[in-house]
């Protein structure tokens, strides 16, 4: 079973995503907004994909305030975690945001909140999870 790590500081959103992914996607879900924990899970290979909220309000890493873009950059620049697919999730989708978020962060995909089409949401995530060898 594939595991999705949800990095999200809004518990309501995290719950909604979890439910959709478990019920519709048949996936396992982990949730944390603790950046150290995100790094541990990523390095240990305990997630197949990360759903990364762009605007994490409370996240701090190594003494610095970080958002989802920054965390994605850290993961993508580390050879141990560079291949882990990351999908950015944001509620603030203006024209052009998508491209700049993706190019800034090195993320693999992008989903806007609120998620309206549950099947499309699951498909977008599935499409980026590497197939089993």
Image (cartoon, helix red, strand yellow):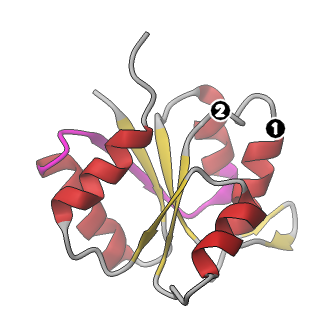
**Quarter of image, res 117:** bottom left
Relative horizontal placement of residue 101, taking residue 30 as reference (left or right): right
Residue 36, percent from left and from top: 70, 51
Q: Mark 1 points at which residue?
A: 78
Residue 55 in view, yes or no: no
Residue 109 in view, yes or no: yes
Taking the magenta stretch, the answer to whether it contains residue 31 is yes
Quarter of the rendering occupied by the N terminus: top left
Relative horizontal placement of residue 83, taking residue 129 as reference (left or right): right
**Quarter of image, res 88:** bottom right
Relative horizontal placement of residue 20, taking residue 85 as reference (left or right): left
**Quarter of image, res 120:** bottom left
- Kindly state the secondary structure of the residue where label 1 is placed: loop
**Residue plotted at (64% across, 71% down):** 99
Residue 45, percent from left and from top: 56, 27
Q: Name the residue under label 2.
A: 83
The residue stretch that appears in magenta: 24-36
Taking the magenta stretch, the answer to whether it contains residue 16 is no
Tell me, yes or no, whether the two marked residues, 2 and 1, touch with CB atoms within 8 Å: no
């Amino acid at each position: 079973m594939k595991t999705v790590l949800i990095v999200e500081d809004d518990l309501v959103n995290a719950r909604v995503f979890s439910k959709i992914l478990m019920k519709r996607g048949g996936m396992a879900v982990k949730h944390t907004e603790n950046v150290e924990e995100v790094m541990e899970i990523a390095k240990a290979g305990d997630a197949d994909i990360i759903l990364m909220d762009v605007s994490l309000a409370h996240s701090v890493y190594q003494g610095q305030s970080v958002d989802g873009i920054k965390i994605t950059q850290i993961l993508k620049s580390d050879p141990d975690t560079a291949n882990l697919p990351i999908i950015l999730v944001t509620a603030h989708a203006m024209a052009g945001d998508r491209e700049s978020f993706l190019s800034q962060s090195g993320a693999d995909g992008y989903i806007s909140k609120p998620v309206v089409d549950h099947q499309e949401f699951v498909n977008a995530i599935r499409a980026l999870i590497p197939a089993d060898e």
